[in-house]
């Protein structure tokens, strides 16, 4: 599922270098103005502090400033190159794209078959599941929209921000990134969360399940030991165990436990008719295989977890 393209790294590096050169050229004027202001300051410092001190301090300051400028330009170029490659991925598959930080270019000719998908890509993400409600602030970028087995689906880079405050009131913000897929699809069990356990959670599985059981959700025990070690299934307190076992039957448990399906998906959430799949980490331009893997995961989730699932499967 979702094999990494051989040529993706070369394309990503080429796009990133091109974007970095554009950004460095765009800052040339500011660099010249900075040097124009820096030289008189150096001359003044030389007359008051001495030439050696001034030259040493000036060289160190210039190297630090230039280093930070190159670092920021390189990071921004990486995001720009990633956005371009994701847009190319969407275009090659007949999907719509919405993003940011794209170079100016003529608008594409309107296409009737893409109109609905473009409307979907442009629409705001609803706060439909717990992950989409997390953090003090949240946003999505590089949204692609298309149909997976006839089901309209959005895939995007999702980020939520959390603030903590130090003893002196200083604010520290942490950023959590995921590649997510969101679609509307009826499910047999809702609300429901399928959570991949971390290494720590595997070690303290009982305590983790007790914590997850607080509130209106509980952890449903299933019969496959390896599945229980690697995953936790959370459902509503009043969920019918028969329905849960019908969805996560022995075959599904075995496939998940042995990582034969959706091996990289860390979270699946179902709530109020919405289905969300999440893969931890921000996507880069040399990781377009993650988009293909996410499409495969959506296809599996629709076929396996959907309310219309064939009982004979």
Image (spheres, rainbow, N blue to C red):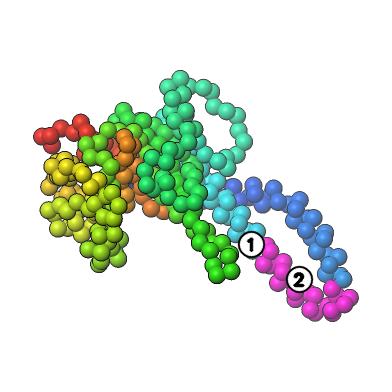
- Looking at this view, is 85 or 7 the one in front? 85
- Residue 52: image location, x then y, percent: 80, 79
| Magenta extent | 45-66
- Where in the figure is residue 71, as x and y percent of width and height? 60, 59
- Contact (CB < 8 A) between labels 1 and 2? no
Label 1: how many Cα within 10 Å (few below 14, some 14–19, many 20+) = few
Q: Mark on residue 68? A: 1
List the single residue furthest toward the right. Answer: 47
The residue at 27%/50% (across/down) is 217
Find residue 106 and report its image quarter. top right
Q: Give the SS element for disc 2.
A: helix
Magenta includes 98? no
Task: Indicate the position of residue 132 as horizontal and vertical percent values.
Answer: 41, 45
Front residue of 188 and 90: 188
Q: Nearer the viewer, residue 21 or 71?
A: 71
Q: Is residue 261 left or right of residue 109?
A: left
Q: Which mark is residue 167?
A: none
Nearer the observer, 310 or 125? 125
Disc 1 secondary structure class: helix
According to the image, label 2 marks what residue?
58
């Amino acid at each position: 599922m979702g094999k990494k393209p051989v040529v993706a790294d070369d394309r990503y590096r080429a796009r990133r270098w091109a974007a970095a050169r554009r950004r460095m050229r765009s800052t040339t004027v500011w660099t010249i103005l900075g040097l124009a202001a820096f030289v008189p300051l150096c001359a003044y410092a030389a007359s008051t502090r001495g030439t050696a001190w001034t030259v040493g301090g000036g060289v160190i300051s210039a190297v630090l400033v230039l280093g930070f400028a190159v670092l920021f330009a390189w990071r921004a170029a990486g995001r720009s190159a990633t956005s371009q490659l994701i847009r190319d991925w969407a275009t090659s598959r007949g999907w719509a794209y919405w993003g940011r930080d794209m170079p100016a270019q003529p608008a594409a000719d309107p296409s009737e078959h893409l109109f609905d998908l473009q409307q979907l890509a442009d629409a705001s993400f609803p706060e439909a599941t717990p992950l989409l409600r997390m953090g003090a602030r949240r946003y999505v970028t590089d949204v692609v929209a298309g149909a997976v087995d006839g089901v309209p689906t959005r895939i995007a880079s999702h980020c939520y921000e959390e603030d903590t405050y130090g003893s002196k009131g200083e604010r520290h913000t942490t950023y959590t990134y995921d590649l997510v897929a969101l679609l509307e699809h009826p499910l047999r069990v809702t609300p429901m969360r399928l959570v991949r356990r971390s290494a720590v959670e595997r070690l303290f599985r009982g305590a983790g399940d007790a914590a997850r059981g607080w509130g209106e959700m509980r952890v449903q025990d299933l019969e496959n030991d390896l599945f229980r070690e690697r995953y936790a299934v959370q459902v509503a307190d009043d969920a019918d165990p028969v329905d849960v076992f019908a969805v996560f039957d022995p075959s599904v448990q075995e496939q998940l436990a042995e990582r034969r399906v959706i091996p990289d998906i860390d979270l699946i959430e179902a709530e109020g008719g919405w289905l969300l799949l999440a893969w931890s980490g921000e996507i880069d331009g040399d990781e377009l295989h993650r988009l293909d893997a996410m499409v495969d995961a959506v296809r599996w989730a629709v076929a396996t977890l959907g309310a219309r699932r064939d009982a004979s499967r």
